[in-house]
Image (tube, rainbow, N blue to C red):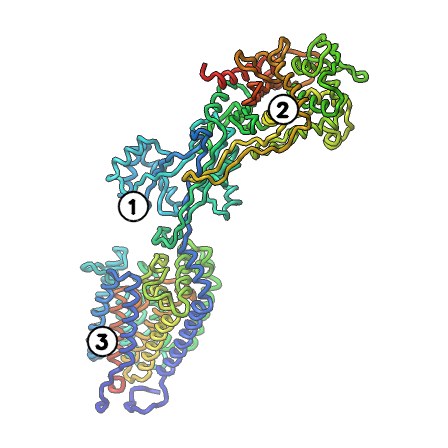
Amino acid sequence: MQGVKNLFDWKILSIILALLVAGGLNQASAAMGGLFFKRQLLWFALGLSIFTVLAFTDYRKLLTPRVLIILYTILLLSLVVLFLKHTRWLRMAGFGIQPSEFAKLVLIGIFSLLLAQRKDTQYLDLKTFLLMSAFAFPVIILVAVTDLDQGGMLFLLYASYIVMAGIPRRYAVALFLVTVFLVFIVGPDLWNKLKPYQRERVEAFLNPEAYRLSRGYQILQALIAVGSGGLKGLGFHKGLSSRLNFLPEKHTDLAFAVWAEEWGFLGAAFVLALFGALILIILKTAYQTRDELGRYLCFGVATMLFWEVTINAGGILHLLPVASVPLPFLSYGGSSVLVNLAGLGLVFAVSRRRYSFR
Amino acid sequence: MSVGNHFSLKEDEPDTFQRRTRIFFGLTVLVFVIFFLRLFFLQVIKGPYYREIARKRTLKSIFLSAPRGNIFDRRGLLLAGNVPSFALSLDIKVVHGPAGDEILRRLAKLLGEDFPSLKQRYLFLRKRATTGEVILEQDLDRDLVAQIEARRFYLPGVQIKVEPERYYPLGPKAFHLVGYVSRISAKELEKLGNKGFDASDFLGRTGLEREFDAVLRGKKGRRLVEVDARGRVRKVVAEEPPIIGNSLVLTVDSFIQQTTYRVLGNVAGAMVIMSPRDGHLLALVSRPSVDPVYFVKKFPPKLWQKINRDKRSPLMNKALAAYPPGSTFKVVTAIAALTKGVVTPETTVFCPGYYRLGRRLFRCWKWGGHGEVNLIKALEVSCDVYFYYLGEQVGIDYLSKIAHECGLGELTGLGFVEESPGLIPSRAWKERVYRRPWQKGETLNVAIGQGAVKVTPLQLARLYAAIVNGGKLYRPWCVARIVDPYGQIIKEYGPEVVARLPIPPRDLSFIRKGLVAAVNAKDGTGRAAALKNILVGGKTGTAQIVSMKRRIHSKKLPYLKRDHAWFVAYAPAEAPEIVTVVFIEHGGHGGSVAAPVAKKFLKAYFEGGK
């Protein structure tokens, strides 16, 4: 509607800024103010400019089928290159780019567009489902070959969209039965066919003490780091686990453990609260948005953040098996920062016009 | 429920998307609540537990070994000390990867080892490394040390570490007296681990090294360090420097010790040289002996096998082990008889060559007998019959009581764990061990030092010292004082009179006359020990191992059945300076085997190198 002025969502912006400050501080400590810290700041700056551009652009003009097809093609090509090279990163001028991160954003765009264009808003029709799957699976499989965790991440994103789109009850029941069948009948057989290191990950989760020198090491050290933080934490730059290198992957996968050790329960709960609030605000934006594309975009970004935070923090807090998924902004990673900020830029754009369209 | 036709800002009925969003909203809230609870549990409730784990994981206490104290002889000459030992240490952080291979290749050339085996050894040790370094080689020789030091520039991460190692200048000559140290065993470490011992420690095993282990050991220092995940030291939190062990100054004279070792010769046996004036030891030798350096380093397996198989038991300190004393014991019988008053020094006994007890005949060692003998003559010729008579008269109870008062059958108080108390048989002892009553004939055997009697060379030395000095039974001692590393005296030892012989000095002088006669008189059994210019007193002893109807010359017997040869000597007889006990295991006749050894020693002692 024309009469409604553009909204400026201060809440989202301030939460993002707070998270960026926390992420900067955390890298300053985890990377001892070294190269990774400086680079992370660089990524923040780059990400914020992308955020700004996207936030003040009309996302509906941006996310056209043509643009998405082009992006998708580039993504697929780079994934094939990675697959052939057997690596996760595209090296560019000294920086590594992780196409699997960008895959999230591309898929969110495609899913949102597909779901926004469908006729039946109650349930997912076969055509849309097949289209979504056709776009999703090549990417998921190609990513999973070099990076199983990111592949799983993309699958979760895909599954969330499917659920959101609505599965007719009989399919849901059928899917449930198939799952039960797989877990209880084929499961044990499949379990035995898994590679030892894949099984070890689950076994280490169940009993980290027994795997204290291999997979369990990461879990135990993360628990020790988080636990020794206590209520108030050991203080900035004073975390024993990170300073003495007991934490592996301390500036990437286990960055949250560094944060929890140095800032304690207060700091860790604060960061988690920021993420929670951010996800809930985005979901609320999705709720309020009348535009189909916008609301699915918001939903997608919220889901992406939700899974990233859940898998990362869940692994560190020993609620889930450890997976190599970065925590947005707190973990070092240029691609992750750029993708998350771009996603939030889209959300911001949707939020500004949430009452305006249609 | 179509969505498309609503433009209004008013809240309508929520559409499908909105309803599902609400579910996602709820799920998100639920997941985050779980996170908060988990975080609270881990950090606030279990916080102290994890903080303790983190502290233990990062703080490590390293022991700093304290150099062991020295052992000096009375002249200040070293008997046990430390020499630097060079170990080859590699920094695992530097010797790593292709560059590390290059270093190892250079080292292999210097060590004369081939590269693959050296690398294999290094990788094996590296896996076990806890301190960030690998000790690749110990006890390097000086040439190699010089070669490595000279190439230091090309060998980054390679270090020569200097550690004190025990060193015994006299080697086998003072082995049994000084003792030895060897590395702590895994079993001992289990027991002593919580008392501050670690795998690099040495323990005193025998002799002075063992008796004064706590004094010599010193106190280990401790360094509390913060280590990182790879076990590398990042920061020294606290340090307590080690305290060097205290040293011992002995009464032993290393020249006399060496002379004694030399004169005893290559036999199985022992010699004790003691001052009768206050009971201090001048030398204590047991042969055959072993070089203690092998215990510190490593025994060549063949040598170790040889030592273990040697029936002459090189590791045993024979000066402190108990053997039948033979005729040297006769002075005890004499003391018993004189104190009980069954004879006076003048009383004579007729020796026809045998002694009749009931229906049994006890032979004198001399076929045909000695005729009329009194105390002095009996000691001179070592007449068995005289002492059979004395033994029968005093009885076993009294004889064993006096023997104990003479310091036999009891530890001397030297303090070595190797020391045996010996054995003085008695009625009670026989009842306990054999469950049979005492036979009168056994008393006669005891009276001449045969049968079950067992004494140590050290006990004999002390007893004869007491006879010579007027009856004072001293505690044998060989440590004069304990000094700290700066030479300050910490503890001083002096003579200790443990007991007095239960015999009046006048009667003792008769025994001494008998001992002088035994060496110097025409028929003396110990004439082989007589010196030209110095009056020597002494007593021979020949202890039978197996009883025989007739005496057979020892040399015709198999080694293990041969007699033990004893000789106790003191000199100069007028004002005795030293007492020396010579014991030669399975040596044969005391007068012909042991006495010449004593003579050689006394000659060397009084006349020097002539």
User: Above or below — where is B94 with respect to B393?
Assistant: below
Q: Nearer the viewer, residue B29 or B454?
A: B454
Q: Would you say the residues marked 2 and 3 are in contact, meaning their CB atoms lie under 8 Å apart?
A: no
| C-alpha gap between disc 2 and disc 3 | 119 Å
What separation in Å lies between label 2 and label 1 (alpha carbons)? Answer: 71 Å
Quick check: can you spot residue A64? no
Q: Nearer the viewer, mark 2 or mark 3?
A: 2
For this rendering, which residue is in front, A243 or A7?
A243
- In the image, residue B446 lies at what x, y percent? 71, 22
Q: Please give the residue where the numbered disc 3 appears in the rendered image.
A: A63
Which element type, helix, strand or loop, lies under badge 1? loop
Give the farthest residue toward the front: B506
- Please give the name of the residue rendered at 29% of the width and 45% of the height, measured from the top-left corner: B94
Q: CA distance from mark 3 to mark 1?
A: 54 Å
Please say if B262 is above or below A13.
Answer: above
The quarter of the rendered structure image containing the C terminus of chain B is top left
To the question of a shared chain for discs 2 and 1, the answer is: yes
Marks 2, 1: nearer the viewer: 2
- Kind of residue sitting beneath label 3: Leu
Viewer-proximal residue, B262 or B120?
B262
Q: Is residue A175 left or right of residue B576?
A: left
Q: Quadrant of residue B92?
A: top left
**Amino acid carrying mark 2 in the image:** Ile
Image spot of residue A293 (x, y percent): 27, 79
Local secondary structure at mark 2: helix
Badge 2 vs badge 1, beta-carbon distance below 8 Å: no
For mark 2, name the chain: B
